[in-house]
Image (tube, grey):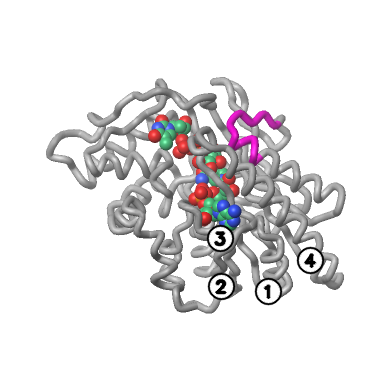
């Protein structure tokens, strides 16, 4: 048995691959284009491990995907690959349409063709798990109930619109062609290997460097935070026990304003790495708001709790403490990301292949 993961060198994908192989020996074929967000150094501990087959390539490359499905005959395709940063989507939406929409379409078509070549048992066991986001539901007012799986799609950014489009394709390929799909819509993740363009890692690395901590607008936008390994366990639960054709929301019941997040990070750094110049919160700087900035996300996770028995292992307090600690212990990872040296990893470690 084998699974095919896309985007397994990114933040969530690499956590997923590491957790997967720590739990059992089922091999992972990892297809990743290694964009700026892909960092094979995240998977350095798997170097030489035959259970991890890394393939540098694009999910839009149909011939490549067809070849991987035919060669490895995975029992599941877990689709993480995406352009994932909202701010980048505002500056340049094109790549989001290509990877998130065309890339998902390419994978769906490749999976559909592949399924037609399988015997009954293999076809019945196959799963296509599409990893998506709560941002497809749009923005909530302060006291509106949290997003359930039946909430209308109201994406507001080019990123969330591209993910919404991909969710619709996945749904249609199930409805029309019977493709055995499952979709997850998760809230904001945080944890190890998070690229420091996103709020939490950016605040940690800037605070450590004594740089400004840029808070958009009034800092009162609300996100619902989940430790990344809890997201990974939710995806495994959906793969193992989810009902084909269903969508599952995943979240942590942890609504926080951005200011609360930044102040928590500052307080933990004050405790773990005090700055002689003063409390880290002195660096908080309010900056121009993100255009179209969604005010609030909140995820109702009762469906996955009820149907699949999934629960997060971390509270926000335990997860954020582990995260800050991880960044303090991985200064070299941060330095290589900031200098761009992480992009040499492939040449250094895979050059001979
Ligand atoms: P990321 O940006 O850290 O990683 C994306 C990975 O996909 C990178 O390794 C990149 O190299 C790869 N990739 C990009 N374009 C590709 C292409 N055309 N072909 C092959 N590989 C390509 O993203 P992430 O934060 O790990 O998010 C993973 C998935 O989870 C995404 O689908 C995202 O929408 C979803 N998601 C993320 C969050 C979050 O908080 N980060 C929350 C919910 C859902
Ligand atoms: O909700 C799930 C989504 O969470 C995922 O689908 C996305 O891939 C992921 O990037 C994340 O999107 P956000 O836009 O919520 O995450 P980001 O870390 O970019 O921003 C979190 C909040 O912090 C948001 O309200 C904007 C704000 N922010 C962000 C940055 C980078 C700041 O105030 N300052 C900053 O410098």
Question: Would you name the residue on which mark 3 appears?
Answer: 32
Secondary structure state at the residue bearing disc 2: strand
Instruction: Identify which residue, 31 or 353, lies in the foreground.
Output: 353
Secondary structure found at label 4:
helix
Is disc 4's CB within 8 Å of ligand 1?
no
Asked whether mark 3 lies closer than 8 Å to ligand 1, one says yes
- Give the CA separation, mark 1 to mark 4: 11 Å
Q: Which residue bears the numbered disc 2?
A: 53
The label nearer to you, 3 versus 1, is 3
First of labels 2, 1 by sequence position: 2
* Residue on which disc 1 sits: 72
Mark 3 vs mark 4, CA separation in Å: 20 Å
For image coordinates 50% across by 59% down, the residue present is 9
Label annotation for residue 91: none
In contact (CB < 8 Å): disc 2 and disc 1: yes
Which one is nearer the viewer's eye here, 311 or 171?
171
Q: Position of residue 52 (x, y in %)?
A: 54, 72
Q: CA distance from mark 3 to mark 2?
A: 11 Å
């Amino acid at each position: 048995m084998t699974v095919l993961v896309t985007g397994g060198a990114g933040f969530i994908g690499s956590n997923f691959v590491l957790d997967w192989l720590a739990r059992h020996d089922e091999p992972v074929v990892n297809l990743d284009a290694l964009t700026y967000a892909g960092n094979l150094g995240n998977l350095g501990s798997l170097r030489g491990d035959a259970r991890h087959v890394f393939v540098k390539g694009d999910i839009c490359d149909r011939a490549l995907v067809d070849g991987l499905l035919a060669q490895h005959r995975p029992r599941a395709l877990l689709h993480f690959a995406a352009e994932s940063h909202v701010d980048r989507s505002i500056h340049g939406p094109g790549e989001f349409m290509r990877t998130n929409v065309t890339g998902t379409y390419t994978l769906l078509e490749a999976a559909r063709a592949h399924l037609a070549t399988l015997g009954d048992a293999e076809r019945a066991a196959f799963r296509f798990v599409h990893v998506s986001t709560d941002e497809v539901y749009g923005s909530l007012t302060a006291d509106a109930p949290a997003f359930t799986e039946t909430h209308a799609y109201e994406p507001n950014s080019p990123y969330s619109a591209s993910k919404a489009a991909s969710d619709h394709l996945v749904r249609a390929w199930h409805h029309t062609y019977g493709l055995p799909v499952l979709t997850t819509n998760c809230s904001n993740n945080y944890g190890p290997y998070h690229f420091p363009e996103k709020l939490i890692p950016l605040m940690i690395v800037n605070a450590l460097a004594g740089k400004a901590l840029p808070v958009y607008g009034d800092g009162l936008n609300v996100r619902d935070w989940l430790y990344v390994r809890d997201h990974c366990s939710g995806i495994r639960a959906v793969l193992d026990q989810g009902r084909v054709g269903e969508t599952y929301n995943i979240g942590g019941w942890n609504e926080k304003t951005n200011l609360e997040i930044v102040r928590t990070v500052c307080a933990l750094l004050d405790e773990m790495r005090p700055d002689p110049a003063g409390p880290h919160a002195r660096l908080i700087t309010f900056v121009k708001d993100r255009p179209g900035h969604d005010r609030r996300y909140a995820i109702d996770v009762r469906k996955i709790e009820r149907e699949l028995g999934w629960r997060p292992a971390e509270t926000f307090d335990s997860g954020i403490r582990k995260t800050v600690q991880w960044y303090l212990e991985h200064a070299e990872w941060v330095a290589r990301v900031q200098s761009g040296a992480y992009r040499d990893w492939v040449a250094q470690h895979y050059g001979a292949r």
